[in-house]
Image: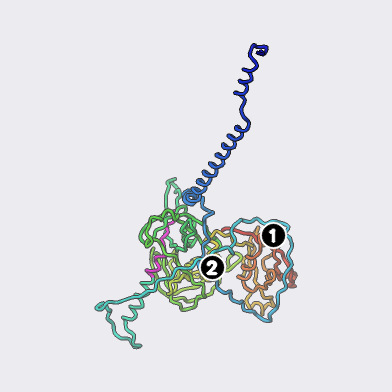
Amino acid sequence: MDENKDGVRQKEYQVIQEQILPKKKSRWKRWGKAVLRTVLLALLFGGISGAAFVLSGKTLAEKFGLGENWRQMVGIGNTTPTPKAVPTKGPTRTPTPLPTRIPTKTPITTEGPSPSGTIMQAPEATPEITVTIEPGQEPSGDVTEDGKTIQEFLKIYSSMSALAHTLEKSMVQVTAITKGVDWFEEDYETRAQASGLYVGDNGIDMLFLVNLDSIEGATKFEVTFADGEKFQSRIFSYDTNYRLAVLAVRLSEVSALEEGVLPVKATFAFDEVETGLPVLVLGNPNGHAGAMEFGTTTGVNRAVPVIDDEVLYFTTGITEYASGDGFVFNLSGEVIGIVSNTLNNGETGVITAVMVGGMREIIENTLNNVPRVYCGLRLEAVEKAMIETYHLPEGIYVTEVLPGSPAMTAGIKNGDIITQVGAVRVTEVRQFYDTVSNVVKGKNIGVMVSREVKGVRKEQVIYLVPEERMH
């Protein structure tokens, strides 16, 4: 038998080779099965983890404050009022669209959702008030000259009181806490009371509308529901121009409460306020938390200028309290005004309130943290008497240009009269604000101004690039 050089027979060597050489076909088969198992396990665990993330993501976001993607847009009405036509003065002219140009300087802007994306929510109906006086409880009274009795008056008064108690379910008391250090380097804490109005939730927080004047400067906030339940809250958003603030309470913190204990969403009226309208003022109108006052409106559609806009307010026949606040309701249970001691042209002695009818978009933008347009102008409509006496053009008068503002950068000056913005001829301040609010971010708009130069009034086009501002 043949032998190799090591003395091992060739046949036996060949048998050993056959035993130690792997078969290529079975090796690839084993690898394929391993890869297939890995892929299937990855898909299985991926599906389980994805489902767990979806189910628990919102809860974790609420706990750690990471729920911005789950926030919903909040509205204060379910219909959009038809814009009223602005009365014309003199012959009607068709405005010529002003040319636009590419801005030479990119404005500083703040990202934010578009106001047009606001999802309106249907308001809850206010329960109808019915007052029943049981037999034997009728108040006695003599018949007056017009045939009406004191009993009828008391029924009306009782109905209004019952309505006020129902509307209080939409109200909360806000405690604004301010901390500081006195002259002796001792820590101190002051507490001020304010009124809040529940306007809905965004899926993460309950939101309460508050007058910024009442809580400005505070560092900590506490919200008390009608039944006495107290919760820590925080500033969600605010607007210094319109003196509005929104406080937030986590929905997860009130989830254990029964539905009857939670505040009821308030409803708003966007119609014009008429003189002599009976109203209720709830909140803190007379210096006492949770108080109510009855009265009527005495003066309406009064305007106070703010930056780039104007605010309409009305007066009541109710005596003013210097640091009072609250909300004004009509007898249908709808909010028609926000009590204000600052946006009232300095009128004192009676309670004044900002009319919510002209503030709907502003309030909704504040509720949803949507930035507002900013040009940096204080404006007033040119009165008809001034037009006739001084032969001025129709338009809006520039009373102030804020330093460093887009208006100053564009070249608008005090004393200019703006007659046209883009393709819109303007005679009211709100027209100016509405028009520039529709300008696409970063784009310019042509503003036609009438300016007196060396005793001669001339018109020229100035290109304005509005900015966006959160507060």
Is the residue 8 above or below the residue 363 in the image? above
User: On the image, which quarter does residue 443 sit in?
Assistant: bottom right
Measuring from the top left, give residue 170's x and y in whole percent.
42, 65
Measuring from the top left, give residue 464's x and y in whole percent.
69, 63
Quarter containing the N terminus: top right
Nearer the observer: mark 2 or 1; the answer is 2
Q: Nearer the viewer, residue 274 or 405?
A: 274
The residue carrying mark 1 is 409
Measuring from the top left, give residue 14's x and y in whole percent.
64, 20
User: On the image, which quarter does residue 30 sit in?
Assistant: top right
Is the residue 131 above or below the residue 49 in the image? below
* Pointer 2 or 1: first along the chain: 2
Q: Residue at x 33, y 81 (%)?
A: 152
Start and end of the magenta stretch? 164-177
How far, Cα to Cα, is label 2 from label 1? Answer: 30 Å
Q: In this view, does 382 lie to the left or right of 364?
A: right
Quarter containing the C terminus: bottom right
Q: Is residue 144 left or right of residue 191?
A: left
Q: What residue type is labelled 1?
A: Thr
Total numbered labels: 2
Question: Is label 1 in a helix, a strand or a loop?
Answer: helix
Q: Which amino acid does label 2 sit on?
A: Arg
Q: Which residue is drawn at 69% across and 71% down?
A: 423
Q: Tag 2: Cα neighbours inside 10 Å, few (<14), some, or many (≥20)?
A: some
The residue carrying mark 2 is 360
Q: Can residue 455 be seen in this view?
A: no
In the picture, the disc for residue 301 is none
Measuring from the top left, give residue 220's x and y in whole percent.
45, 53
Q: Tag 1: Cα neighbours inside 10 Å, few (<14), some, or many (≥20)?
A: some
- Whether residue 173 appears in magenta in the rendering, the answer is yes
